[in-house]
Amino acid sequence: MSDTPSLHDRALPVADLLKTLAHPARLVIACALAEQARSVGELEQALDIHQPGLSRHLASLRAARVVSCRREGQSMIYHLANDKAGQLIMTLHTIFCASEAHASPALKPEAV
Amino acid sequence: MSDTPSLHDRALPVADLLKTLAHPARLVIACALAEQARSVGELEQALDIHQPGLSRHLASLRAARVVSCRREGQSMIYHLANDKAGQLIMTLHTIFCASEAHASPALKPEAV
DNA sequence: CTTGTATTATCGATAATTCGATAATACCTG
DNA sequence: CAGGTATTATCGAATTATCGATAATACAAG
């Protein structure tokens, strides 16, 4: 019975990641960062989320180890820090964006 | 401005699906059903979730159109009803189960 | 050291999720 | 139709997530 990792325990970290991404704002942020690293200001401008909320969602993503940030001059540059999350985002894009006919080739917010 | 599907609106259904699966119990249920259709009794026995909770989670999955059910004699047989959810589950399995060395080749709960 | 900008943290209120326990419904068997 | 099993729905309480507004901190420029 020692090789039964509880099935539930194995599902827990996965469910946690899903929960972290299960918010439109956080999902869009993660998508944008999967494309390239961006500063908070760029994210705010590109995604149309007001600063306090953006910061709060970035904090959640940081706490879940999905993103990391480094300071660069005055700006804080965020980037994906979790390969698994990155793979997941890519798959979501394939499933939900590529299959339905959308103009933009990716979840690309206008450009920055 | 009419070709701006709001990026947020495009993310909403995806985030909803993630939220639906973002619970260990529901995730495990969906995994089990991705493998094969099962009755409620089989799920209860295989996944070690007590009936009322199981039923509640199945109701959530039904409401989100992730699963459907058909009656078969006394039992209610559940099966995945959403191709996108199925693809997502498969990807999750690839990312989180296949990469780490686990004995079982799949999220296979003992057999039923 | 002071000003201005970028970023993060906090507060309070509201809404949503979750869980255990229990009741109600639907179906098969005889 | 009665008895037994399988499944679903409901209730109340506790925890957690979410949001807008505002305050606090960190850095760069002069």
Image: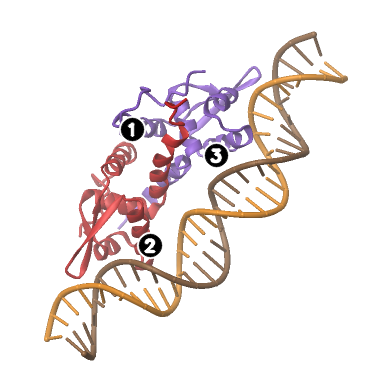
Chain colours: A purple, B red, C orange, D brown
Counting residues from the start of the chain, the first of labels 1 and 3 encountered is 3
Q: How many residues crowd around disc 1 within 10 Å: few (fewer than 14), some, or many (20 or more)?
A: some
Quick check: B38 left or right of A24?
left
Inter-mark Cα distance, 2 to 1: 28 Å
Q: Which mark is residue A60?
A: 3
- Could you say whether the residue bearing mark 1 is in a helix, strand or loop? helix
Where residue B109 sits, quadrant-wise, is bottom left
Inter-mark Cα distance, 3 to 2: 28 Å
Name the amino acid type tagged 1: Thr
Q: Are marks 1 and 3 on the same chain?
A: yes
**Residue at mark 2:** B56
Quick check: A8 left or right of B34?
right
The foreground one among A106 and A3 is A106
- In the rendered view, tell whether residue B35 sits above or below residue A56: below
Name the amino acid type tagged 2: Arg
Inter-mark Cα distance, 1 to 3: 22 Å
Place of residue B100 in the rendered image (x, y in percent of width and height, measured from the top left): 33, 38
Q: How many residues crowd around disc 3 within 10 Å: few (fewer than 14), some, or many (20 or more)?
A: some
Where residue D1 sits, quadrant-wise, is bottom left
Tell which subunit mark 3 falls on: A
- Could you say whether the residue bearing mark 2 is in a helix, strand or loop? helix
Which of pointers 3 and 2 indicates the residue nearer the eye? Answer: 2
Place of residue B90 in the rendered image (x, y in percent of width and height, measured from the top left): 27, 41
Q: Which mark is residue A91?
A: 1
Q: Are marks 1 and 3 in contact (CB under 8 Å)?
A: no
Place of residue B96 in the rendered image (x, y in percent of width and height, measured from the top left): 34, 40
Q: How many residues crowd around disc 2 within 10 Å: few (fewer than 14), some, or many (20 or more)?
A: few
Name the amino acid type tagged 3: Ser
